[in-house]
Image (tube, rainbow, N blue to C red):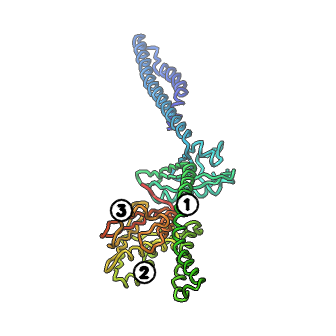
């Protein structure tokens, strides 16, 4: 478009040259002293009309092009103004990764104001800023992942600022291809979700504070019962009213119960730092099934694994095993005699896969179902009520969810959703 515009801009200068050449040249060619005056006049008139005709055509296209160019420039200015006023980081790159445009927010964020970025790639741009050098180099890899995915990709990226603070962005990368499949351009949009993350953090903190009262009541209830038993027997032993020796095993059991409660509370209140890596989820599930197969066989319960797909995920495998063991044990314990538990692995959608545990046990009443996961709430007679609390916490740390449905006397279904990849592809 720019080359076309430049061509039309030189038309007036070309016209200034061609015009005199036409007038002088045609006069010279038509000059003949023997020609009748009327004939010369007719030829001059025809020449003038022809000149006016071509001039009018050239003038029409010239004015039309100027008008179109002006409209294009106006639209371009509107688009640039719109992009610059957006509170998001917006940039455009060509098929080779060279920068075409970045809005003011992005230029300020990466300290690129006043720099001629057009035609430069991320590696070249990184040379202009020491502080954001690594962040720009990292874009090379994430851009390539978007190209390979062939669709819109999305991920959360945190950028450290010079003042010590940080900003979290919900980053979208949109690859655009030519009809022949070659790379045409890449649109990158980073939405600042720092305030949203801070609000979510405050909300979670508020929820934690609101549950402290429930925790305190639960702890008092769960620990007071065994303590009352221990204190009663010790008091009677002190008064020599009974012989404690026959009751020592029961007292040890009560102490173990208190110890179990304390350990579970430590997991909930101070989860240890875990290391994440890419693991095959099918392998993790198989190991859990193998671990509990003996317990299931003793109760005549069949464990059936249906691997509809094979998946890798970014996780801590030991923590996921803890979740799956807890869910599978609950399923086994819900079946009185001769039942089965079906474990199915399948693709939920483009972003998530699912591990579903389905049993044909006693089921859970709807009124009790909504309380599962709350501290010290258990549907089992001797349950502590922290197993599912810990499980929900672990899956949440893996950016996943747990969905539970149940029907009394028919069974329970527990579906665990986990993301497929660290960088998620979305449609």
Q: Secondary structure at mark 2?
A: helix
Q: Position of residue 323 (x, y in %)?
A: 47, 71
The disc at residue 366 is 3
Q: Position of residue 201 (x, y in %)?
A: 56, 54
Left or right, 45 with reference to 173: left
Please report the residue visible at 63 percent of the width from the left and 53 percent of the height from the top: 166
Res. 230 in view: yes
Q: Which residue is mark 1?
A: 212
Q: Which residue is mark 2?
A: 292
Q: Position of residue 164 (x, y in %)?
A: 68, 53
- Quarter of the figure with residue 38: top left
Q: Secondary structure at mark 1?
A: helix
Please report the residue visible at 46 percent of the width from the left and 68 percent of the height from the top: 388
Please report the residue visible at 53 percent of the width from the left and 48 percent of the height from the top: 191
Q: Give me the C-alpha separation between circle 2 and circle 3.
A: 28 Å
State which tag comes first along the sequence, 1 or 2: 1
Left or right, 160 with reference to 4: right
- Quarter of the figure with residue 361: bottom left
Tag in front: 2 or 3: 3
């Amino acid at each position: 478009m720019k080359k076309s515009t430049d061509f039309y801009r030189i038309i007036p200068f070309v016209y200034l040259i061609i015009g005199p050449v036409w007038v002088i040249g045609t006069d010279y060619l038509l000059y003949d002293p023997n020609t009748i005056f009327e004939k010369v006049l007719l030829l001059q008139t025809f020449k003038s009309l022809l000149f006016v005709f071509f001039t009018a055509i050239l003038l029409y296209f010239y004015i039309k092009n100027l008008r179109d160019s002006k409209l294009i420039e106006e639209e371009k200015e509107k688009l640039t103004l719109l992009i610059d006023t957006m509170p998001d980081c917006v940039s455009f790159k060509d098929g080779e990764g060279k920068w075409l445009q970045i809005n003011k927010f992005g230029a300020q964020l990466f300290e690129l104001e006043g720099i001629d970025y057009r035609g430069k790639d991320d590696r070249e741009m990184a040379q202009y800023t020491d502080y954001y050098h690594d962040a720009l180099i990292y874009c090379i890899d994430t851009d390539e992942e978007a190209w390979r995915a062939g669709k819109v990709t999305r991920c959360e990226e945190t950028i450290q600022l010079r003042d010590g603070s940080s900003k979290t962005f919900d980053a979208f990368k949109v690859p655009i291809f030519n009809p022949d499949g070659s790379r045409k351009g890449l649109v990158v949009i980073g939405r600042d979700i720092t305030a949203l993350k801070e609000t979510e953090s405050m909300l979670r903190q508020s929820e934690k504070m609101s549950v402290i009262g429930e925790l305190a009541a639960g702890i008092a209830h769960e620990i007071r019962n065994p303590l009352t038993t221990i204190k009663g027997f010790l008091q009677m032993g002190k008064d020599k009213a009974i012989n404690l020796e026959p009751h020592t095993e029961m007292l040890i059991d009560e102490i173990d119960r208190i110890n179990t409660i304390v350990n579970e509370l430590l997991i909930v209140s101070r989860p240890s730092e875990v290391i994440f890596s890419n693991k095959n989820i099918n392998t993790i599930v198989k190991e859990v099934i193998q671990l509990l197969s003996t317990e299931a066989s003793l109760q005549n319960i069949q464990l059936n694994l249906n691997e509809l797909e094979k998946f890798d995920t970014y996780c801590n495998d030991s923590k996921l095993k803890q979740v799956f063991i807890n869910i599978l044990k609950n399923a086994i314990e819900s079946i009185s005699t001769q039942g089965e538990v079906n474990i199915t692995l399948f693709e939920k959608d483009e972003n998530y896969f699912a591990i579903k545990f389905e049993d044909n046990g006693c089921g859970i009443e709807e009124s009790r179902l909504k309380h599962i996961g709350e501290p010290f709430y258990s549907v089992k007679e001797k349950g502590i009520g922290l197993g599912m609390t810990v499980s929900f916490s672990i899956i949440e740390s893996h950016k996943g969810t747990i969905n539970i449905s149940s029907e009394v006397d028919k069974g329970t279904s527990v579906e665990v959703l986990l993301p497929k990849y660290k960088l998620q592809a979305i449609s």
